[in-house]
Image (cartoon, grey):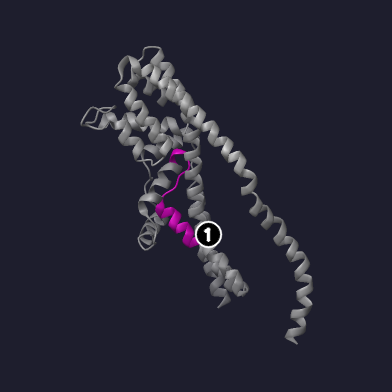
Amino acid sequence: MQTLFALLAALMGGVAIASMVSAIRLESAPNRALADFAQNESKPDLLDRVGQRLWRYLPLDPARWGLNVEWACLAGKHYSLGRVTANALLYGGGVAAALLIAEAAPLLWLTVPAAAALPFINLRAAANEARTAAERGLPEVAALVAAELAANNPPDKALQRAADTAGVLGLILKGALAEARSSSRPLFSRKPLKGALVVWVERWRLPSLLAFGSSLDLVAGKGVAGEAMMSRIAQGMSREYREKLLKRAEALESNLVLPSAIFFFVPFMAAVVVPVLLPLFETLRR
């Protein structure tokens, strides 16, 4: 039986290594991000197809996690729901096989769901990293748009200049311009039709990004008065971002209390209690 489990663990390990090797892409980060942005998922391989079938049985919101995949792709990290689900199966199955072979204590079986959840945790972390990068670039892009409008450039030209900036936010704005070119919608709203910019930023479900897109859409319809309005909007976004950073810095100390306590307290208790309890357990077993 142990030989069978060992073969199963080796098979899962080989598939996991093959999955990681196949995910390596020899191209620059900007080119990879643009490719993933234009085509969310590459041609699905065996792991993708298996994962897509398993995904249907998971009690997870496909819209939410699909959006996480899109955000992660904007950051240049290649994910797909199928591959993440398949990796979760491999990680959980690999740990379970190792525990069976080692005849581990029942308490260690709690690591199986933790291992299975790891690919989803990594996906969400990559998506949140991209969201943070987009928020960080908003004040700078808003100031750039305000400067372009002050130079008497039209709003669409200002948005084009902003889209040429590197990073996650530049890719999102490029997507808005592509949406306007490929659809019948104008770039900015014209009653009763909503503009492609607002429609595009709404799909990313990031409040600060939606506020920027809606503000620029409003400024585009103000004509000459839009220049001063955009300047005030840029100043307001910069001020709000600084305030948010200050709040995060103030909350950092309290947020570190629990991890620090776990990091120091648990090893300390293990070092003190385990040597005391081991002789007791040996006595009880006799």
Which quadrant is home to the C terminus? bottom right
The rendered magenta stretch, by its main secondary structure, is classed as helix
What residue sits right under mark 1 in the picture?
Answer: 14
Position of residue 117 measured from the top left corner of the image (x, y, whole percent): 50, 59
Question: Does any portion of residue 164 appear in the rendered image?
Answer: no
Q: In the image shown, does 164 or 42 lie closer to the viewer? A: 164
Residue with the most extreme bottom position: 286
Choose top left, top right, bottom left or bottom right for residue 231. Answer: top left
Q: In the image shown, does 224 or 72 lie closer to the viewer? A: 224
Q: Amino acid at mark 1?
A: Gly
Eyeballing the image, is 88 above or below 141?
below
Please check the rendered image and state whether residue 8 is part of the magenta-colored stretch, yes or no. Answer: no
Residue at 61% in and 40% down: 250
Q: In the image shown, does 193 or 274 lie closer to the viewer? A: 193
Please check the rendered image and state whether residue 86 is part of the magenta-colored stretch, yes or no. Answer: yes
Position of residue 243 measured from the top left corner of the image (x, y, whole percent): 54, 33
Which quadrant is home to the N terminus? bottom right
Query: Where are the magenta residues, as a range?
Result: 73-90
Position of residue 79 measured from the top left corner of the image (x, y, whole percent): 44, 47
Residue with the most extreme top position: 151
Mark 1 residue element? helix
Q: Would you say 193 lies left or right of 209 here?
A: left
Residue at 36% in and 14% down: 153
Sort mark 1 into few (<14), some (14-19) or many (20+) by Cα contacts within 10 Å: few
Position of residue 106 measured from the top left corner of the image (x, y, whole percent): 59, 74
Eyeballing the image, is 54 above or below 233?
below
Question: Does any portion of residue 137 appear in the rendered image?
Answer: yes
Residue at 60% in and 72% down: 107
Eyeballing the image, is 269 above or below 263?
below
